[in-house]
Image (cartoon, rainbow, N blue to C red):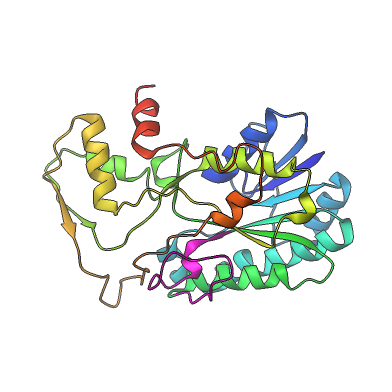
């Protein structure tokens, strides 16, 4: 089987690439800005080049990890975010129809408003900010192509092996905990998140691609760890593992406010029973947050 991965240099994309590299499948890893290590550069907004590369490779599965994932950055570049999160995704779905591949569009729990968790795959979406709206619109663009085999995979905030801590909204909190310079940090203790390991997601996607009853896969899947944390609570876990003081990190239990604040939902827990009930070998295969970090930070 041939598997093409977009955004293959990102935290999730690189984990997906590593997982598929350990299988007999042939992998093509695309990246926009980062190079080296077998990455193939491609501007996904260049539809002619995209058509050429995908036609020549002729994939069986395309896992679309490339996206603008930072809500605060999205607000500053609405046109660019629309192009990557929506237009590119719709074009990949159109190609899925003509080239007969399965498209996996990685979406987010931020398509929901966070007022009535847990959210099932069929729950009404109501994103609160531009990032969530573009990912919701990307879902609609992908699922609206008649005749295309497309799967929307919604995931929450992600963590795992990363080239830089700043590549993940969870990993970067390590830098906050380790900054013992005396600087004080105000840390969100308002929104509940369900940090999920990219290695777990990647391994699940490998098992899903080998799923014998692939015709039974619904158009929208939810994949999420079940452990709830605020960002402040994540910092406490890191401080415990690293045996560092955390008095410089101050919990902030208020909702984001002010003209410069990006609106974020309070609790977008994803209901995963439909995904579990599919019967994919190994189930969700989730690891525990503190346990994984304890082992990872020993290396």
Q: Nearer the viewer, residue 158 or 193?
A: 193
Q: Nearer the viewer, residue 126 or 58?
A: 126
Q: Position of residue 246 (x, y in %)?
A: 15, 42
Q: Is residue 121 magenta?
A: yes
Q: What residue lies at 19% left-to-right and 61% top-to-bottom? A: 252
Quadrant where the N terminus sits is top right
Q: What residue lies at 27% left-to-right and 38% top-to-bottom? A: 238
Q: What residue lies at 49% left-to-right and 40% top-to-bottom? A: 286
Q: Position of residue 145 (x, y in %)?
A: 78, 71
Q: Residue 65: in sight, yes or no?
A: no
Classify residue 96 as left or right of residue 66: right
Residue furthest top in the image: 299
Q: What residue lies at 68% left-to-right and 35% top-to-bottom? A: 20
Which residues, given as a range, are shown in magenta?
107-127
Figure label count:
0
Classify residue 109 as left or right of residue 61: left
């Amino acid at each position: 089987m041939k598997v093409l991965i977009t955004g293959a240099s990102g935290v999730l994309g690189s984990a997906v690439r590593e997982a598929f590299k350990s299988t007999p499948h042939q992998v093509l890893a695309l990246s926009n800005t980062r190079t080296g290590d077998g990455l193939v550069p491609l501007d996904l907004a260049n539809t002619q080049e995209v058509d050429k590369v995908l036609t020549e490779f002729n994939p069986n599965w395309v896992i679309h990890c490339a996206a603008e994932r930072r809500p605060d950055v999205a607000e500053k570049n609405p046109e660019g975010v629309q192009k990557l999160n929506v237009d590119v995704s719709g074009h990949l779905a159109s190609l899925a129809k003509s080239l007969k591949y399965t498209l996996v569009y990685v979406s987010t729990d931020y398509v929901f408003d966070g007022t009535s968790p847990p959210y099932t795959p069929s729950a009404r979406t109501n994103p609160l900010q531009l990032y969530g709206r573009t990912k919701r619109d990307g879902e609609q663009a992908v699922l609206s192509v008649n005749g295309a085999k497309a799967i929307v995979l919604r995931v929450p905030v992600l963590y795992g092996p990363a080239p830089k801590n700043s590549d993940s909204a969870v990993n970067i909190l390590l830098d906050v905990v380790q900054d013992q310079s005396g600087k004080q940090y105000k840390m969100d203790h308002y929104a509940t998140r369900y940090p999920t390991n990219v290695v777990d997601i990647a391994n699940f996607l490998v098992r899903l691609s080998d799923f014998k009853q692939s015709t039974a896969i619904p158009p929208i899947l939810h994949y999420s760890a079940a452990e709830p944390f605020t960002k402040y609570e994540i910092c406490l876990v890191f401080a415990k593992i690293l045996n560092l003081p955390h008095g410089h990190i101050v919990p902030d239990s208020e909702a984001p406010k002010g003209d410069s604040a990006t609106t974020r939902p309070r609790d977008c827990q994803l209901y995963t029973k439909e995904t579990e009930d599919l019967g994919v070998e190994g189930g969700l295969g989730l690891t525990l947050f503190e346990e994984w970090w304890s082992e990872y930070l020993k290396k």
